[in-house]
């Protein structure tokens, strides 16, 4: 992978997060990464901050790239981006689109039906190496073309394109639910009387520890709840209130709302 050439079209927030991660964990060297963006200031910033190539002509960068990452917004000139790729990119390169809501069928319409196209919904935990991106491949694409790259900013699950919206609302939006849970939990500690910093540290440790415990024991959460909750005890009294709050259904409704919104945005509803 270290010698693969990667060209980004669009050097915004998501491209930067991916670039920072893949350079820092040596998935790709800065001299093998090029970026084109219509915003000169952005280009200068990325070059000065990460040492990526920004002076190469787009045509040359496309011709030399093994991976081409489309990282513009859905409302940007995707037809123009597709045209320049189809004119200049090497036929054996793989085209990765991270543009939310744009289907492989639409990408084929812009780029042509004779290329490897991979539609990716990137995870946003890029700096941690954790979190799953979702990737759907067209018939010409192979996992080996993108596996190292996608694992360079987290992990990856390959899926049928029909599951991408669900993956977005449940998986990629997933850290939001967890951030909100942790914030609410720390607030509960403060409400009960613990100093904020102590409540915060305990919340973080409990979330990390509970995940580690599930992985370590391979037990189902219900089994661990049964072990922790003695008859009439502290835990079961707390859980009774949580059940009364509609916690599980509320969480599940929020995931369904996120999935629904993903689908609406993909259809062009603002
Ligand atoms: N941010 C996330 O968490 C996230 C998560 C999943 C997926 N995505 C997807 O990732 C894509 C990028 O999102 P983002 O948050 O990084 O957006 P962003 O920060 O606005 O980045 C897009 C960049 O592309 C540039 N651009 C527009 N048209 C161009 C063209 N024809 N050629 C070259 N550069 C062009 C824009 O320049 P100007 O600003 O000058 O127009 C901007 O710098 C989106 O499609 C989004 O759906 C983002």
Image (cartoon, rainbow, N blue to C red):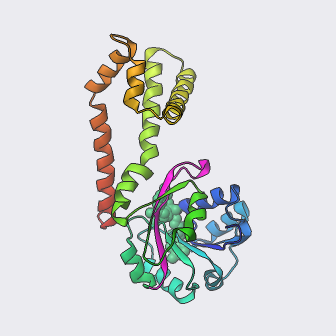
**Nearer the observer, 61 or 25:** 25
Residue 59 on image: x %, y %: 61, 85
Q: How many marks?
A: 0
Give the residue displayed 38% in from the left and 61% down from the top: 164
Residue most extreme to the top: 232
Q: In the rendered image, is residue 85 in sight? A: yes
Residue 92: within the magenta?
no
Give the residue displayed 67% in from the left and 63% down from the top: 45
Residue 130: within the magenta?
yes
On screen, residue 241 above or below 61: above
Give the residue displayed 69% in from the left and 79% down from the top: 56
Residue 7 on image: x %, y %: 61, 73
* Quadrant for the N terminus in the image: bottom right
**Boundaries of the magenta span:** 114-135
**Could you tell whether 241 is left or right of 21 in the image?**
left
* Quadrant for the C terminus in the image: bottom left
The quarter of the picture where residue 19 lies is bottom right
Give the residue displayed 39% in from the left and 24% down from the top: 225
């Amino acid at each position: 992978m270290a010698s693969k050439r990667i060209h980004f079209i669009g050097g915004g927030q998501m491209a930067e997060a991916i670039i920072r991660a893949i350079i820092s964990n040596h998935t790709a060297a800065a001299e093998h990464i090029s970026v084109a963006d219509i915003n000169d200031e952005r280009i200068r910033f990325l070059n000065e901050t990460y040492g990526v190539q920004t002076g190469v002509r787009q045509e040359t960068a496309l011709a030399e790239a093994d991976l081409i990452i489309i990282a513009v917004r859905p409302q940007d000139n995707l037809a123009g981006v597709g045209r320049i790729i189809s004119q200049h990119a090497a036929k054996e390169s793989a085209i990765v689109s991270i543009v939310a809501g744009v289907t492989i069928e639409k990408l084929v319409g812009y780029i042509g039906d004779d290329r490897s196209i991979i539609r990716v919904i990137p995870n946003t935990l890029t700096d941690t190496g954790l979190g799953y991106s979702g990737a759907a491949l067209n018939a010409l694409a192979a996992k080996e073309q993108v596996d190292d790259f996608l694992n360079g900013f987290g992990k990856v699950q390959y899926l049928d394109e029909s599951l991408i919206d669900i993956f977005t609302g449940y998986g990629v939006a997933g850290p939001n639910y967890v951030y909100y849970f942790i914030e609410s939990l720390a607030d509960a500690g403060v409400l009960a009387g613990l100093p904020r910093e102590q409540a915060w540290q305990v919340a973080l440790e409990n979330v990390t520890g509970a995940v580690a415990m599930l992985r370590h024991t391979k037990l189902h959460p219900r089994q661990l709840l049964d072990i922790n909750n003695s008859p009439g005890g502290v835990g079961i009294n707390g859980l009774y209130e949580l059940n009364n709050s509609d916690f599980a259904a509320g969480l599940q409704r929020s995931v369904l709302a996120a999935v629904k919104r993903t689908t609406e945005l993909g259809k062009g509803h603002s």
